[in-house]
Amino acid sequence: MEPVFHRTVLGLDIGQHSAKAVRLVRRRNGLVRVTHQEMVRIPAGMGSAEQSVLIARWLSQQGFRMEPCVISVRGLNVLFQTLALAPDDPRPAELAVELEISRLSEIATESMVHGFMEIAAAADKGRRFLIGLARAETVGQAVGTARGAGADVVEMVPTPVAGALAVGAVERAGGCLAVADIGMGGTDVAVVGPEGIRFARSFAVGGQSFTEALARAKRMTATQAEPVKIAGGLEGPDKETLMSAAEHWVSEFKACLGIYRSYFSGPSDQPVELVLTGGGALLKGLERFLAWKLGMETRLLKDLPGGDNRREDSALYGVACGLALAGVGAAGKRYISLLPLEIREAVLLRRQRRYWVTAAALITLTAAVNLLGSYRDQQRKTDELRSQHESWSRRQALQREIEGIQQLHLRLDRMTGTVQTLLQNGPAFRDVVSALAERLETNCWITLVADANSYFAQENLVKPEARRVPRGIAPAERKEGEPAVLQGDIRFSRVIVEGYTTDTSFASVQKLIDSLKVAGFIQKADLLGDDQLIEEDTARWGLAGGKRFVIDLTL
């Protein structure tokens, strides 16, 4: 089912320790603008019900309740699979994806929700698709939490895809971009090419891994280690401890890129930059460390699509902004949607219901106006109809007179056309008749000489019922009383000769044809037809047992 886009959408990214919201508005010219970007912290150990209450209160304070909302599914809860089809695979995309999902669902023991998108073509021009599958229970919990907070859920997108949408909307590199959204419990990885998202994965190494490594080294709780990590980062006194965690992160990230290279191995397909988003990306010194370890330019996301000002914390809102971009249609259909079908149908029905109500109101108003004005209009129309009837009678009489004059002019034009044709073609007919007279045997008679167009259209002096056209050619009918008019170009190139002979072997006719072929003004002469005389012909010409012939001359 097609996605439903909205003009104003709230991208709501609910994580383990915070919830982030970006409100995006799509203007009439198609441009988007960020109007709000807000965040609320979620205390550790808070249950789903308590989270919903906290987020609901926060959304009310910001004025976001019951706005169309796009929510996320954590990348760690989504199984991503790349499907490659050969160039000669005739299957439609939906069928091929459904078969792959059926194969993957056989492995899973629970009900799954899936979505897919087409990605860049392979080097052999084969089609590729990125498929995402998530447990129906996980999707239901995410929807329940958002709805419990008063959000009007209209779409659901995996976090790796959402982060890639935000980065792809503002970053324009010379090649492919790698995107890493470092959250508390994991990292979402995506690769964005010139045509859009190519790859998505997640691994379970995030900001919490850095905190736990520091807590173990300093023998303190995670709550105590968190502010120490934030204060010093990879530039503080505990950088050696944090670098070991960063090395672990780099190895996981390289593993993801290794999977990507198995599908896109060309040099131009390799990422040239790494853009970081998420709270974990703000760790001091992490940018420089990753640039050194990975050998590629690494930087934080500094801008959001449609943002008026650069903000240092823009990287925190990458996923939320990508969710909003999907909701307003800025990404088109190039993203993975995991919204359950029943929710999508309800969203579509609700949108259509507004149009139904508006249409019903307009129909009722129109009917009321028509009924109100019908009585007064009836009298006026009666007078107008009487006047129009009299005018119409006069016009009909005038129309009949005009049609009679037009028919007369048409007949005169056709008659003058006949005279003009005869005058223009007189010399050609004279030459043909002279050639026939010089070469005609005594046992042959010529009954008709006509140009081909007139002959086959039956526009000659012989009655239509006595004319027999060669088989396969249908004569055109002429209306009763209509003058016979020679049709076609004034200068014709084909002449039809019709006659009778008593020579049943047609030797004299063939001799006539052969002699005509050598005439200087005749290019070709062919026998077009030979028929036994019918009774009417025998009575007319007195040639019992004779045959009729038709010769086609090309001048």
Image (cartoon, rainbow, N blue to C red):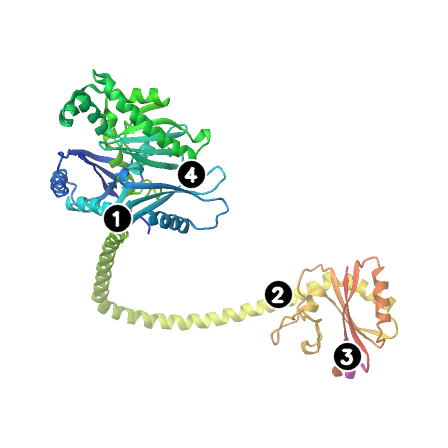
Q: Is residue 320 visible?
A: yes
Residue located at (32% from left, 41% from top): 79
Kind of residue sitting beneath label 4: Ala
Kind of residue sitting beneath label 3: Leu
- Residue bearing mark 2: 413
- Residue bearing mark 4: 120
Q: Is residue 28 visible?
A: no
* Sequence-first disc among 3 and 2: 2
Mark 1 lies on a secondary structure that is helix
Q: Does the residue at mark 1 contact the one at mark 4 (Cβ under 8 Å)?
A: no
Q: Main secondary structure of the magenta part?
A: helix
Residue located at (20% from left, 65% from top): 372
Residue 33 position, x and y percent, is: 26, 36
Q: Nearer the viewer, residue 487 or 257?
A: 257
- Residue bearing mark 1: 136
Q: CA distance from mark 3 to mark 2?
A: 37 Å
Kind of residue sitting beneath label 1: Ala
- Residue bearing mark 3: 533
